[in-house]
């Protein structure tokens, strides 16, 4: 059995990939990695801002956006760590299909 395919990915592993591949490639790598094995990207790594300045490209227009589980709870993202704003934006923005 190939040990690399069964070991959970660590934050250090993800950050090493981010530095080596650049943000775009790291985002593609994370998007292709099963959710259970993911370590999320730091907000700084993807230039996240709480209020985007490009109309139609807010976090709630992005396919990686995860709406709050409760009406007053924080939103989150499949790729970026921490709470995010529905009106935020980052370099990993991907429009909904
Ligand atoms: S724009 Fe960035 S932070 Fe916002 S939902 Fe998309 S990937 Fe996540």
Image (tube, rainbow, N blue to C red):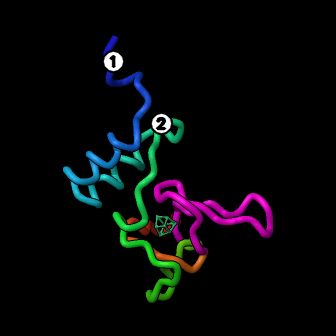
- The residue labelled by disc 1 is 3
Percent across and percent down for residue 14 are 35, 45
Query: Is 42 left, or right, of 17 in this rendering?
Result: right
Percent across and percent down for residue 96 are 52, 66
Q: Residue furthest front?
A: 12
Q: Is residue 81 a member of the stretch shown in magenta?
A: yes
Instruction: Mark 2: give few (<14), some (14-19) or many (20+) Cα within 10 Å.
Output: few
Q: Is residue 15 a member of the stretch shown in magenta?
A: no
Q: Nearer the viewer, residue 34 or 73?
A: 73
Q: What residue sits 52% from the left and 62% below the top?
A: 63
Percent across and percent down for residue 7 are 40, 24
Secondary structure of residue under mark 2: helix
Query: Is 94 left, or right, of 26 in this rendering?
Result: right
35 above or below 95? above
Figure disc tally: 2
Q: What residue sits 43% from the left and 72% below the top?
A: 48
Q: What residue sits 32% from the left and 24% below the top?
A: 4
Q: Earlier in the sequence, mark 2 or mark 1?
A: 1
How far is disc 2 from disc 1 in space, using C-alphas?
Answer: 14 Å
- The residue labelled by disc 2 is 37
Secondary structure of residue under mark 1: helix
Instruction: Mark 1: give few (<14), some (14-19) or many (20+) Cα within 10 Å.
Output: few
Do callouts 2 and 1 mark residues in contact (Cβ within 8 Å)? Answer: no
Main secondary structure of the magenta stretch: loop
Query: For the N terminus, which image quadrant?
Result: top left
The residue stretch that appears in magenta: 62-85
Q: Residue furthest right?
A: 71
Q: Nearer the viewer, residue 36 or 14?
A: 14
């Amino acid at each position: 059995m190939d040990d690399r395919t069964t070991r959970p990915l660590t934050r250090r592993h993800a950050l090493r990939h981010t530095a080596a591949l650049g943000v775009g490639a790291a985002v593609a790598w994370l998007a292709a990695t099963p959710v259970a094995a993911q370590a999320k990207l730091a907000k700084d790594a993807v230039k996240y801002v709480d209020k985007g300045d490009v109309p139609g490209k807010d976090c709630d227009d992005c396919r990686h956006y995860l709406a709050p589980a409760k009406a007053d709870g924080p939103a989150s993202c499949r790729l970026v760590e921490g709470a995010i704003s529905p009106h935020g934006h980052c370099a990993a923005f991907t429009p909904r299909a």
